[in-house]
Image (cartoon, helix red, strand yellow):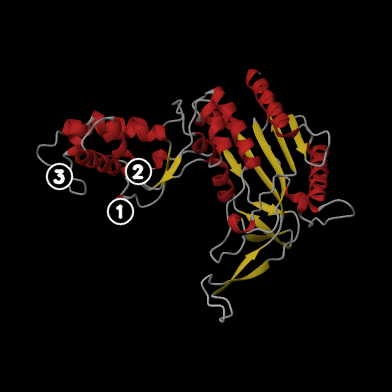
Amino acid sequence: MIVELHIIQNFAPSNLNRDDSNTPKDCEFGGYRRARISSQCIKRSVRRHSAFADTVKSGGGEVGIRTKRLKMRLVELLVEKHGKLAEESEKAAVAIIDLLGFKLGEAEKTEYLLYLGEGEVKELADIALSAWDGLVTLEIGKEKKKKDAPPEALKQAQDALKSVVAKSRKDARCYAADIALFGRMVADNKNMNVDAACQVAHALSTHKVEMEMDYFTAIDDLQPGEDSGSDMIGVVEFDSSCFYRYSAIDLNKLNENLGFNSDLLAATVKGYIDASVKAVPTGKQNSMAAQNPPGYVRVVVRKDGFPWSLANAFQKPVLAKGEQSLEERSITELKKYMDQLKKVYGDESIVCDASFNLYDENTAGLTGLLATVESSLAKGATA
């Protein structure tokens, strides 16, 4: 089964997702320049939102952490939870990181960000404890160990690492919910890679976009009265866009990544949808406050592997028309295109097609939408 999420969301003037020149990201689509929010930005907004974390925790799961400070976290666990000496804990942590295939660089941080669940970090700490004598006497970076380093203890640590890190598909391995959704790629240890269960598209404006520029100045509050002029000038670019957002979750893959835990599966999907609706990127929000909730959200659950992005509904840029706003026109075009796809390809595989519309007085709202999807997933699991 596949769960698809379609969102129409109009933002006031903003710069939610910037490129290297601090300009809002954009691209060409359908022959016209469009505003864009990258999928990476969207995923981070979702995984960091409290609606996702709280719902996942209610289902018995956890949210991962992205960090270079693995050594620091391991030492904290070994000292505070297990009562080990700080000096020995640092040696053991460095040894574990080395055995995993990672290198520590400046400030004792890994060379790049690692994406780990807290449960995985605790497992590494447990492995360190199981082979403590071998690890604390190991000289990292040298071909030979000290003579007093028990080789059997070191081998025990290596074997324990393999059993945890080399995760075969046969294992009912439960990853952190966001890692289960978005996957993980580790260049130095491919055994730690996790195939993503969720595909997230770049959000695109449903209409043509022209970038605008804000020229601003600032005056020194202690400037003498007889002086004039500003003490700082600057320029910031922005736009105002109505976005179409799309993502799809492979429920079979997500179920596998979550260790075939049905309660956690339901909580992860519910938390993902809830957070996707509520999460807004943080770029330039303190100066623009574009806190605009979606006008339309649609969730489609289908029992085959033939997902439909509705982005092509907006190949021709949408324009506000008559009394209909840009967001309303975008909703109309999306629904029209969906109906065309159903007519051509059929809708036999669709087991749930639920939505809410801000401009419909009879809409069920977000709470009703989540309840409908949750019920549909429960029926699918039973079937």
Specify few, some or many for label 1: CA neighbours under 10 Å numbering under 14, 14-19, or 20 or more: few
Counting labels gives: 3
The image quadrant of residue 156 is: top left
Q: Which mark is residue 144?
A: 3
Q: Amino acid at mark 1?
A: Ala
Is mark 1 in CB contact (under 8 Å) with mark 3? no
Residue 349 lies in quadrant: top right
Q: In the image, is 328 to the left or to the right of 217? A: right
Quadrant where the N terminus is found in the figure? top right
Q: Of the residues shown, which amino acid type is indicated by label 2?
A: Leu
- Report the Cα–Cα distance between label 1 and label 3: 25 Å
Under mark 3, the amino acid is Lys
Residue farthest along the front direction in this orientation: 225
Residue bearing the label numbered 2: 70
Q: Which residue is mark 1?
A: 107
Residue at the extreme left: 147
The picture places residue 287, in percent across and down from the top left corner, at 61, 59
Question: Residue at horizontal 53%, vertical 35%?
Answer: 53
Q: Which mark sits nearer the N-terminus, 2 or 3?
A: 2
Q: What is the spatial separation of the Cα atoms under label 2 and label 1, in whole angstroms?
A: 12 Å
Whether residue 347 sits left or right of residue 307 in the image: it is right
Which residue is found at the position 65% from the left and 58% from the top? 14
Q: Quadrant of residue 322?
A: bottom right
Q: Secondary structure at mark 2?
A: helix
